[in-house]
Image: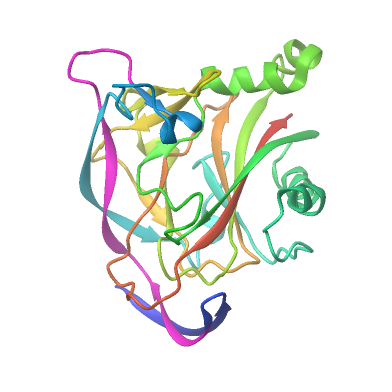
Amino acid sequence: MSTTTQTQTSTKFGTTADIPVPRGPTQSNLTFFVAPEDGSKPWSLAGDNVDNPPPGVPQRNYGEFSHEVTIQDIRGRESSFDFNVNGFGTVSGVKSEEKDFNDDAHIEQVYYPEVKKLLLDNAPGAHRVFIFDHTIRRSDPNAKRAPVNRAHIDQTTKSAEARVYHHMGDEAEELLKGRVRLINVWRPLNGPVVASPLAYADSRSVPDEDIVGVEHRYPDRTGETAGVKYTEKGQWYYWSGMTNEERILLQCYDSKDGARTPHSAFVDPRTQKDWPGRESIEVRALVFG
């Protein structure tokens, strides 16, 4: 049964008192991958190609469609989920010295070491972490990146291994002999989250045949992400009212156990128009061991 919890939060929109944070299961439409009709390799433009596409080239060559799914709330049963098993897990009570998240250099200097320690402390067996980028998303028409309502996985086996070669240089071959994970650390910047929450599927509930590599075509290189087909087997979850001191760990690749986590923002039908839009940061890291 769906419930709400009263809270008070201070955001760039001003102080919003007594927001009834939506709790419990909900239903929402997620956007899923549809393969190109001609059977060709799926691709999409990325980076500067999005704003300045080559003449006559569409943004992507594959289709998408929306389907309603039930999204369960993990609030109150966080310990039931392990990112090495389900593909996602939680960490609570995390303090940060980074407050503004407006300067990339400062984020790398202050926030990256915090994330590195978080992963070393919470990823069993991890002995080395390399953070390679981050993305800030804001629900603002003028924002560079907004929440993405599309089921996807940030990396495939191919692109994760390519990341190791790209970032680790001469050490790559040796590192790839051991366990390699690619983990996203996700948190809100203006919690509690009351709009555009993040949903994630239990990795075990989405069959391999429903995950499709999609070329990500930049002007100077080609990467690969994964599109996710709709499956009735998919079990979707979210963490209601996430605060700034809570973290979701999303495992996008694991060379040992294969856990990979489809995820997507979603529109909660309980969200009211005057509530503050979600702001968040996701940090992507290679985790060795």
Q: Is residue 20 magenta?
A: yes
Q: Work out whether residue 39 or residue 120 is closer to the camera in this orientation and state it.
A: 39
Q: Is residue 256 magenta?
A: no
Q: Quadrant of residue 287?
A: top right
Q: Quadrant of residue 217?
A: top left
Rendered position, 203 above or below 114: above
Residue 254: image location, x then y, percent: 58, 28
Residue 255: image location, x then y, percent: 59, 23
Name which residue lies at 32% across and 14% down.
41
Name which residue lies at 26% across and 60% down.
27
Name which residue lies at 33% across and 21% down.
55
Q: Is residue 107 left or right of residue 153?
A: right
Q: Main secondary structure of the magenta part?
A: strand
Q: Which residues are magenta?
A: 15-42
Residue 140: image location, x then y, percent: 45, 62
How many circles with numbers are drawn on the protein?
A: 0
* Quadrant into which the C terminus falls: top right
Q: Work out whether residue 174 or residue 40 is closer to the camera in this orientation and state it.
A: 40
